[in-house]
Image: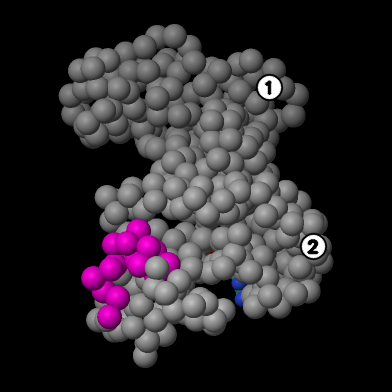
Amino acid sequence: MSVSFQSLTKRFGADLAIDSLDLDIEPESFTVFCGPPKCGKSVLFRLLVGLETPDSGSIILNGTDITRIGPANRQVGYVPQSFALYPHLTVYQNIAYPLTLARRPKDEIARRVDRAAGILSITHLLEKTPDLLSGGEKQRTAVARGLLHDASVFVLDDPLVGLDYKLRERLMDELKSLQTELKATFLYATSDSMEALTMAERLIVLDKGRKVQDGSVETVYREPDHLRAMELIGFPRANLIGGRHSSGLLEAGPFRIPLHRDTPGEVVIGIRPEAIKLGGNQGIAASAEVRLVEDLGSEYVVYLDSNGQALTAAYPVGDSPAPAFQSSQGFAVEPRDIVIFDAGSGARIGRGAA
Ligand SMILES: Nc1ncnc2c1ncn2[C@@H]1O[C@H](COP(=O)(O)OP(=O)(O)OP(=O)(O)O)[C@@H](O)[C@H]1O
């Protein structure tokens, strides 16, 4: 099923939670939404599920306007960010709930609950009540329940937040396979860069209720259109440094960048950790003290202090040995690897060089 949001707007008092959002989502696709806290992810999902009513605009599901249809008749599967399990029901009954409501045959319910419980590794908990579960087990029960709706559109609001890394990694794979198998349309919100990069076929970056970038993971990573896209996507996180541009010179932290631009103003520059070349001399050069070196197995992450400005550099293990703690290091950044954003709007202005 396709999903379209047309000029969708939702206010809470004077706050614009969703601001004139236009978006068309293809059937059977996996779209990831990410953004800083309070960017509007949960409100957007609640609007789609029918738990909030928009102030204006429409929501179209497979060509049908569902904006005024109640949640029970929308057939959108939902894993909410904060979930509540029915305390008097077992894990089995909690997971089965949407299918029991839909009066599905008992053997079908049993088959589908077993499958969902297997994916989420909670088969051994099926007869327990929620008071006997850990927080992570409750969360996995809620995810299983959300996936058991009779629906072709599923909305998952940060479903893996807080789970341990190994489990998250496995569940990311399982959710992707399930989406392909169900031939369903998945809308998935996450605040985690790794999840966004791993799972998204299409990545939508939201900021203050607006869509500030929409594209493939590759595009959002390489060509961030907005400060938020650069800030949120990528690990280790990009270096973001506030600065000012006037009279053809941009000054930000240790960087002085000649810039042919007429309008002076406040800017933020973004530099990916891998663009800081330790020992390099191509481009804009400076020096820094090494504060910490982390060996992540495949890469070194080096935390630097350049004249009071904290910087993170990263490079593959094997390229050159890790620098010594507290040593002084020269480094360089190619101007084209410096992305410049307007500090007020967050919009991209350009790069340090064409
Ligand atoms: N019921 C409500 N009443 C008033 N304001 C609300 C309500 N629900 C959401 N908001 C506001 O709408 C904005 C968007 O909230 P939303 O919950 O969608 O953020 P989010 O992107 O999901 O953030 P997080 O990742 O922190 O959950 C926030 O400013 C929030 O305070």
Q: What range is drawn magenta here?
A: 112-127
Image check: 275 left or right of 133?
A: right
Residue 118: in magenta span: yes
**Residue 69, placed above or below residue 194:** below
Picture quarter with ligand 1: bottom right
Q: Residue at 29%, 54% (x, y): give it.
A: 167
Question: Which quarter shows the N terminus?
Answer: bottom right
Q: Which mark is residue 64?
A: 2
Tell me the kind of residue under disc 2.
Answer: Thr
The answer to whether residue 8 shows anywhere in this view is: no
Pick whichever, 230 or 333, lies toward us. Answer: 230
- Residue that protrudes farthest toward the top in the picture: 282
Residue 271 appears in the picture as rendered: yes
* Closer-to-camera residue (108/243): 108
Q: Looking at the image, what colour scheme do you see?
A: one colour
Mark 1: which amino acid? Ser
Percent across and percent down for residue 158 are 47, 59
Q: Which mark is residue 123?
A: none
Residue identifier under label 1: 247
What secondary structure do most residues of the magenta stretch adopt? helix
Q: Residue at x 46, y 40 (%)?
A: 197
Give residue 72's position: percent from left, percent from top. Answer: 65, 78
